[in-house]
Structure formats: C-alpha cells, structure tokens
Image (tube, helix red, strand yellow):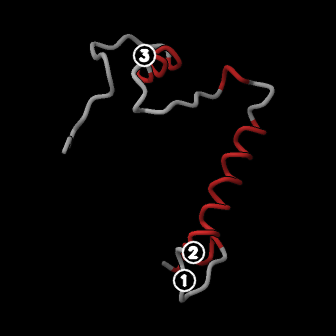
Amino acid sequence: MYNTVKLHGTSDDDPYNEEIMKAHYRKHNSDVYEYFKNRPNDLLVINVSDKNAYQRFINFIGIDSPYTGFPWENRT
C-alpha cells in the first residue's frame, strides 16, 4: 500500500482512490501513444478478447504458433 500511495499521490486513508487511479491510467496510456506516435509499427494495441487478437499478436512479434488463440492456464 505504501508504494501505491507514494507512486500515485493518494492518501493513506484512500490509497486506491478511483478517480486518481483512473487519471494515472489514462495519463500512462496517453504518454505511451505519444511516445510511439511516429513509430506506429512498434506498438501493438489489442483487446485480447477480440477474435483476431492472437493472430495480430503473433504476427507482430514475428513467430509461428500452433495455437489459434491465447492459451489459457486457469480458465474459469
């Protein structure tokens, strides 16, 4: 909890403040997109639940795979 408070600037009595945590998440994503804005082929953004996400992933990293989707270890 101490690291969360220190990193995100939340208070000790509300270390996982939803508004602050979401703002940090959005800022991080924005920073990543900004960093890669002139290098679109170096960043892959996928929704792992999309049907073609796994194929896009293996194409991006340049491998062949015997799987047709992301392997699951503990599917519930």
Reading the chain from its start, which is encountered first: label 2 or label 3? Answer: 2
Q: CA distance from mark 3 to mark 1?
A: 41 Å
Residue 30 coordinates in the image, percent (x, y): 73, 46
Reading the chain from its start, which is encountered first: label 3 or label 1? Answer: 1
Furthest toward the bottom, the residue is: 13
Looking at the image, residue 19 sits to the left or right of residue 16; the answer is right
Identified at 56% across, 87% down, the residue is 12
| Picture layout, residue 60 above or below residue 72 | above
Identified at 43% across, 18% down, the residue is 52
Q: Image quadrant of residue 45?
A: top right
Q: Amino acid at mark 3?
A: Gln
Looking at the image, residue 66 sits to the left or right of residue 45; the answer is left
Identified at 78% across, 30% down, the residue is 37
Q: Amino acid at mark 1?
A: Asp
Residue matched to label 3: 55
Contact between labelled residues 2 and 1, with CB atoms less than 8 Å apart: yes
| Picture layout, residue 17 above or below residue 37 | below
Residue 46 coordinates in the image, percent (x, y): 52, 30
| Picture layout, residue 23 above or below residue 12 | above
Q: Amino acid at mark 2?
A: Asn
| Picture layout, residue 64 above or below residue 14 | above
Residue 47 coordinates in the image, percent (x, y): 48, 33
Res. 17 mark: 2
Contact between labelled residues 1 and 3, with CB atoms less than 8 Å apart: no
